[in-house]
Amino acid sequence: MDDSPYYRLLGRLYAWTFWMRYRRFLGFSVRTWLILLSLGLIFFVAGQGWSLIITLLLIALALLLQAAFWASARAGYNKFVPDDSISLPSNEVLEPIPANQKVTVRATGVFSLTGREDFVLLRRPTEYWHVPLGEHILMVEQLPGSYLYQFFNGQTLQTVQNGWFIFGRQPRRALAVTFLVTFGPDYNDPSLLYFVGSGEGAALPKPRTIYLSFDNEADHRAVWHTLTHAARQARA
């Protein structure tokens, strides 16, 4: 990726607003304290009879701050920029990771348990591996001793796209992995285990995209080869 000032600025904005949103002080997020401070400053300046121009400037800055928080949250505090120049030739010999061998990655997206889901951003440690029967597994340590998961296989895997993950000071090389979700709270209905018939009422699989970034090029290429190999086998 070109050293784009726009993406560097956008990445810093996402990182700053994310930190403000999730870092807490005296029971409130830093974002809340900053908004309250800006509103208090506006009322103070207006009450002191300062110049109308100063009051309007403070109001404009407060609105700009709110807009930055809103836009960052709506974007999920990150952006993925596809890079079509990075691709695997169809005749390239793939070198997938051996079954049950784990690779540590950084994961972003919604991860699940049977009873809950949560969004994680560049969460590490995240372990990726696949098993001989074809299932691919991502295990995120959300909190010490608390894990979230994603499961998919060659049939549910939809696309694997190379690109750049925008968050922080510099874009990161990343993979965008889109698959059909069949695990999580929407699919945790014990009554369906005993249902006999057409299966009406069961939640349908839905697409989900997660992003994987890596600390070194070797791990990036190994996971890329493994997912591409699984997709080609499923469609052969």
Image (tube, grey):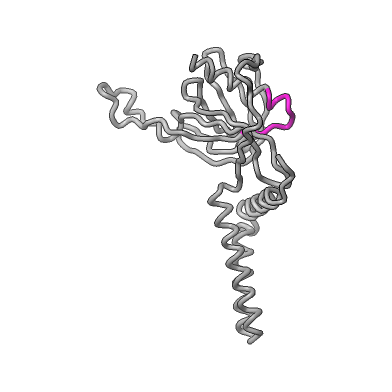
Percent x, y for residue 215? 73, 32
Q: Is residue 127 found left or right of 180 in the rendered image?
A: right
User: Furthest residue to the left?
Assistant: 197
> Where does residue 32 sit, x and y in percent of width and height?
59, 61
Q: Position of residue 175 (x, y in %)?
A: 62, 32
Q: Which residue occupies 43% across, 35% down?
A: 185
Residue at the location (64% across, 58% down)? 30
Q: Residue at x 53, y 51 (%)?
A: 74
The residue range painted magenta reads 212-221
The picture quadrant where one finds residue 213 is top right
Residue toward you, 154 or 124: 154
31 over 228 or under it: above or below: below
Residue 141 shows up from this direction? no
Residue 215 showing in the rendered view? yes
Which quarter of the figure has residue 144? top right
Residue 228, image quadrant? top right
- In the picture, the quarter occupied by the N terminus is top right
Furthest-bottom residue in this view: 49
